[in-house]
């Protein structure tokens, strides 16, 4: 018995809808810590070259600004202190922040366009910090 190929025709709209669903599923932002860490490894997106503002922290003043520059410089500024320069690096699947010459292994707890939550494993108690995109101040004359 010889088999004949099936000649099934789908409307173009069904094919486009199916393809769109496939793309949406492939581009979904990570929900698990492992996927978020992988996203942080692609540092050209995510948290790099953006101004982040502390919205909540167990050890950092609310309103403190963090900038993770793409070449590895970390800039931290607070309304209550002088700006500080440090270093950040993401190597071997781990984020490290170096402040005042002291390296701190840092866990990425959540990373999205709206929130960057980290836990800095400092000596003593770890410090959890939630960062959000910084608000732009109004222009003044």
Image (cartoon, helix red, strand yellow):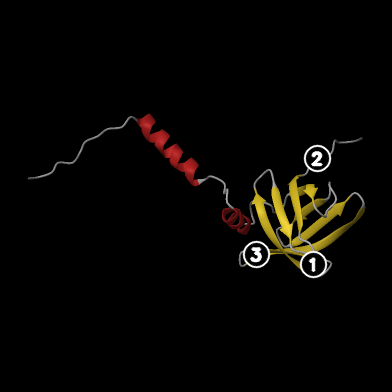
- Which residue has dot 2 on it? 136
Q: Nearer the viewer, residue 12 or 116?
A: 116
Q: Secondary structure at mark 2?
A: loop
| 3 vs 2, front mark | 3
Percent x, y of residue 107: 68, 59
- Residue drawn at x 71%, y 55% is 118
Which of disc 1 and disc 3 is earlier in sequence? 3
Q: Nearer the viewer, residue 6 or 124?
A: 124
Which of disc 1 and disc 2 is earlier in sequence? 1
Where 110 falls versus 21 (above or below)? below
Q: Crowding at label 3, few (<14), some or many (≥20) Cα neighbours within 10 Å? A: some
- Residue drawn at x 69%, y 46% is 115
Q: Secondary structure at mark 1?
A: loop
Question: Is residue 71 found left or right of 75 in the rendered image?
Answer: left
Separation of disc 3 and disc 2 at Cα? 30 Å
Separation of disc 2 and disc 1 at Cα? 34 Å
Separation of disc 3 and disc 1 at Cα? 18 Å
| 3 vs 1, front mark | 1
Percent x, y of residue 66: 79, 53
Whether pointer 2 and pointer 1 mark residues with C-beta atoms closer than 8 Å, the reply is: no
Which of disc 2 and disc 3 is earlier in sequence? 3
- Which residue has dot 1 on it? 123
- Which residue has dot 3 on it? 94
Q: Quadrant of residue 126?
A: bottom right
Q: Secondary structure at mark 3?
A: strand
- Residue drawn at x 85%, y 50% is 61
Which quarter of the figure is the C terminus placed in? top right
| 2 vs 1, front mark | 1
Q: Which mark is residue 79?
A: none
């Amino acid at each position: 018995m010889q088999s004949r190929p099936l000649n099934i025709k789908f409307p173009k709209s069904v094919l486009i809808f199916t393809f769109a669903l496939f793309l949406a599923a492939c581009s979904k932002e990570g929900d698990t810590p492992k996927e978020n860490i992988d996203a942080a490894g692609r540092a050209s997106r995510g948290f790099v070259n953006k101004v982040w503002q502390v919205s909540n922290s167990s050890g950092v003043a609310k309103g403190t600004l963090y900038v993770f520059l793409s070449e590895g410089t970390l800039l931290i500024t607070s309304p209550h202190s002088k700006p500080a320069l440090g270093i950040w690096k993401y190597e071997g699947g781990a984020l490290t922040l170096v402040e005042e010459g002291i390296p701190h292994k840092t866990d990425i707890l959540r990373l999205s366009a709206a929130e960057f939550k980290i836990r800095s494993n400092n000596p003593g108690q770890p410090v959890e910090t939630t960062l959000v995109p910084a608000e732009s101040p109004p222009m003044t004359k």
